[in-house]
Image (spheres, grey):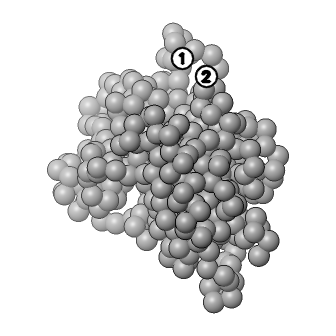
Amino acid sequence: MVNETSEQLSPPLAQQRTLRILAVTNLWPEQGSYRGIFVQRQVSALRALGHHVDVEVVAQSRGKLDYFTAASRIRRRARAGGYDIVHVHYGMTAPAARLAGHPARVLSLYGSDVNAPRQRFMTKLGWGGTRARIYVSRRLAETAGDAAGHVVANGVDFQLFQPGDRFAARQALGIAPDARVVLFGADPGRAVKGYDVFRDALAELRRQDPSVQELILSAPGQPEADLVRKYDAADVMLFTSRPGSEGSPTVVKEATAMGLPVVTVDVGDVGEVLADVRPGAVVPFPAGPLTGAARDHLVSELANRVREVLHHGVRANGRERSSWLDERLVAQRIAEIYRSVLGS
């Protein structure tokens, strides 16, 4: 299995053939959402390398029926576009792209498309004939049992997500300079993100320190500048997603690039991303149902780890430890996989 992204740069673009790529995805920002922003950023990074990338969005605003009706649309576009590669993002879209015709197909897998039984069934229906499969974490590739899979974590825009003025960020967001701010890196309305666990851990922290307050990263239509401000303004991110719902959590990597300490449950590739990052912590998720004593223990352990970070009151060394996540390097690694498929 191919390892994570190398930091070694590819040869100059002038020495490489420009590729024509059709990205087929059900993960794409629409109507002010951040759904699939990591796919959009990968497309932008590939374009910055000089490649031509078109995008075909499946389902989303068209509705779930489009998973079954999009095949002819994708086939027509693939035939007409003269593409070298059809890059399918997310397993649920794989069946619709299976009959794309001549271009070589590459499939990227992100989490629930491998971990959730129904979605995995759809993924398996569509991945026949794919010339390469890319997993955003080693754990995901192992779950899929795919020894031939490539492991390439989603990248981070290191130019956008870089540490700034913490005081100015708090002032812009209306946060008191002396508040203890714990960031929730998701939409609280999505049950798989575990806001209930986050909320209970905060309640435990507040019993000893009433100055602790929450900050929610997600907000419909907010500019990227506000995302950056929230990372700057927070003291720590507490990440509480349920197992099986994450492949390579983008927000954990963004926080790491910003130097924000992260306390997280052990999901996706967070153990690898945070292996050399201090302060912070990766807390094992209990086996079995998250109820009773197991749930209480998890909440208490997360609260204790957050309390330790707040006590130290320093930023993390994540930026210097995570340069391999720079989206420019990730895009180069993806392009190398394309070329290995095409034999060029």
In whole angstroms, how far apart are the C-alphas of marks 2 and 1? 7 Å
Q: Which amino acid is tagged 2?
A: Pro
The answer to whether 106 appears left or right of 189 in the picture is: right
Q: Which residue is mark 1?
A: 290
Q: Position of residue 316 (x, y in %)?
A: 49, 56
Q: Position of residue 295 (x, y in %)?
A: 51, 17
- Compare residues 328 and 22 and report the one nearer the observer: 22
Q: Which amino acid is tagged 1?
A: Leu
State the SS at label 2: loop
The residue depicted at 73 percent of the width and 37 percent of the height is 144
Q: Position of residue 192 (x, y in %)?
A: 47, 29
The residue depicted at 75 percent of the width and 56 percent of the height is 131
- Occupied quadrant, residue 153: bottom right
Q: Are marks 2 and 1 in contact (CB under 8 Å)?
A: yes
Relative height, residue 310 to residue 50 (above, below)? above
Q: Which residue is mark 2?
A: 286
Image mark for residue 19: none
Question: Is residue 255 among what the camera can see?
Answer: no
